[in-house]
């Protein structure tokens, strides 16, 4: 592999790590707010959670843009390791599904009015499912990158 290819690979790895760090920080903040006390402060709780969901949504949008076909590390894997193309495609689809779930939850939270009863347990359950799926996808991505390049993308996770 030439110097230019190594530099490009390293740039892709660095971008992917930055994206993963951004989305993990957003996920941690979301879990912190979702796990905070809610009784008697339901609407404050909801606002904090909603803001954290919006931050996660932005982080995932950036990550998706950097991993779109023709861009970034996943596209490089498709090119450099064609045997992994199906797994790259599946990973993109599942990340997109997580992003869609986050967007759907954000829209649901948008519709809650001050006079509405807030089902905190239901919102927390949806957040737990999203967090679990996101962590699962992160692990799959780490394994895929390692299999393709022997680079541990999960460093620091």
Image (tube, helix red, strand yellow):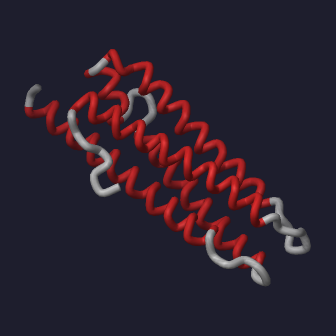
Reply above or below: 13 against 23.
Answer: above
**Height in image: 52 above or below 19?**
below
Considering depth in this image, is 120 or 50 the residue closer to the camera? 120
Q: Position of residue 33 (x, y in %)?
A: 60, 71
Q: Position of residue 51 (x, y in %)?
A: 62, 67
Residue at 63%, 76% in the rendered image = 36
Q: Nearer the viewer, residue 69 or 123?
A: 123
Residue shown at the point (49%, 64%) measured from the top left: 28
Taking the spot 51% from the left edge, 59% from the top edge, the residue there is 27
Percent x, y of residue 4:
13, 33
Which quadrant, please, contains the N terminus?
top left
> Quarter of the image containing the C terminus?
bottom left
Residue shown at 91% from the left, 73% from the top? 115
Q: How many marks?
A: 0
Q: Residue furthest right?
A: 115
Residue 30 point in image, percent of width and height: 57, 64
Q: Residue furthest bottom?
A: 40
Q: In the picture shown, does residue 154 fall above or below 73?
A: below
Left or right: where 93 falls relative to 40: left
């Amino acid at each position: 592999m030439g110097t230019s290819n190594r530099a490009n690979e390293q740039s892709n790895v660095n971008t992917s790590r930055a994206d993963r760090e951004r989305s993990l920080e957003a996920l941690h903040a979301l879990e912190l707010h979702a796990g905070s006390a809610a009784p008697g402060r339901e609407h404050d709780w909801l606002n904090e959670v909603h803001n954290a969901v919006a931050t996660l949504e932005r982080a995932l949008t950036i990550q998706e843009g950097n991993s779109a076909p023709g861009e970034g590390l996943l596209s490089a894997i498709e090119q450099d390791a064609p045997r992994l193309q199906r797994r790259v495609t599946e990973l993109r689809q599942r990340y997109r599904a997580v992003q869609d779930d986050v967007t759907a939850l954000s829209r649901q939270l948008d519709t809650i009015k001050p006079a509405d009863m807030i089902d905190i347990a239901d919102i927390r359950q949806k957040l737990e499912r999203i967090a679990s799926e996101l962590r699962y996808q992160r692990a799959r991505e780490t394994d895929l990158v390692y299999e393709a390049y022997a680079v541990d993308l999960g460093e620091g996770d």
